[in-house]
Amino acid sequence: MKTFLTTLILLLLVSSGTMAQSKKERADEIKRLQRATEVFREIMRTPDKGIPGDLLDRAECVAIVPGLKKGGLGIGGRYGKGVVMCRRPNKQWSAPSFLTVEGGSFGLQIGFQQIDVVMLIMNRKGMERLVGDKFTVGADASAAAGPVGRSTSAETNVRLDAEILTYSRAKGLFAGVTINGAVVKQDKDDNRDFYGKEMDARAILFEGTVPMPQEARPLAAALSRESPKKQ
């Protein structure tokens, strides 16, 4: 009996430690969701200087990388972690999938130490790139600097043929910029930590089998510009 109780206590201690580690790891993804929500809301708070609403309504997926940093500590180029959501057939947003962005030339803002990046994935071809292991912006997927303002215009139509429209914000300045050469990868480790098991981006974003986590509802609401209760 004593041996049984000792074994049971050890199992409980191991289980408790595993749960605590899991919660700590998941906290990083939750903070990223919160920061991505803040970034997007701040960008859209000024319609004349944000992403055109009609363009956002046409986007199949939206990826946000808050605080992408210029290389340091042995990392060349730029590096950042972000999150992406895609529209389901019912027009509601999918659960979030996590990603990383590495390297690339970020237009005129290359001198800044830290920027926020937003990518609109505009068609199915771009979506397929998104759920692969990785792709290079501008090489594997056509990309262009996205227009800014209340609505798109005839002058920007040429850019709407791109698979991905890209934006960045640094020190309060938000603009469409090219990020050619940036490598976008699925972050399978972060997806595992957040969902508690191995999760593929395709299953999360396309198949509709992953329910919307409570922690992601504010971001879904921000993207839809409606109440989180509707998600």
Image: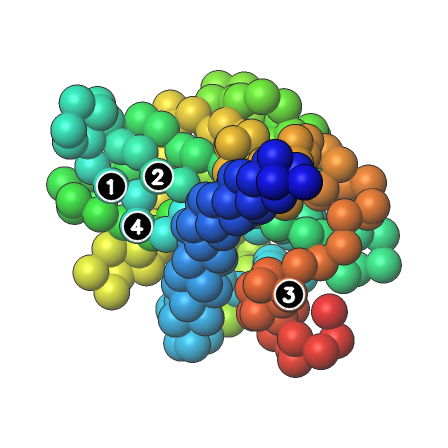
Mark 2 falls on what kind of element?
strand
Residue matched to label 1: 69
Foreground label between 1 and 3: 3
Q: Is residue 44 visible?
A: yes
The CA distance from mark 3 to mark 2 is 24 Å
The CA distance from mark 3 to mark 4 is 23 Å
Residue at 75%, 36% in the rendered image: 203
Report if the CB atoms under discs 4 and 2 are less than 8 Å apart. yes
Label 1 sits on what residue type? Lys
The CA distance from mark 4 to mark 2 is 7 Å
Report if the CB atoms under discs 2 and 1 are less than 8 Å apart. yes
Mark linked to residue 67: 4
Report if the CB atoms under discs 1 and 3 are less than 8 Å apart. no
Label 2 sits on what residue type? Gly
Foreground label between 3 and 2: 3
Report if the CB atoms under discs 4 and 1 are less than 8 Å apart. yes
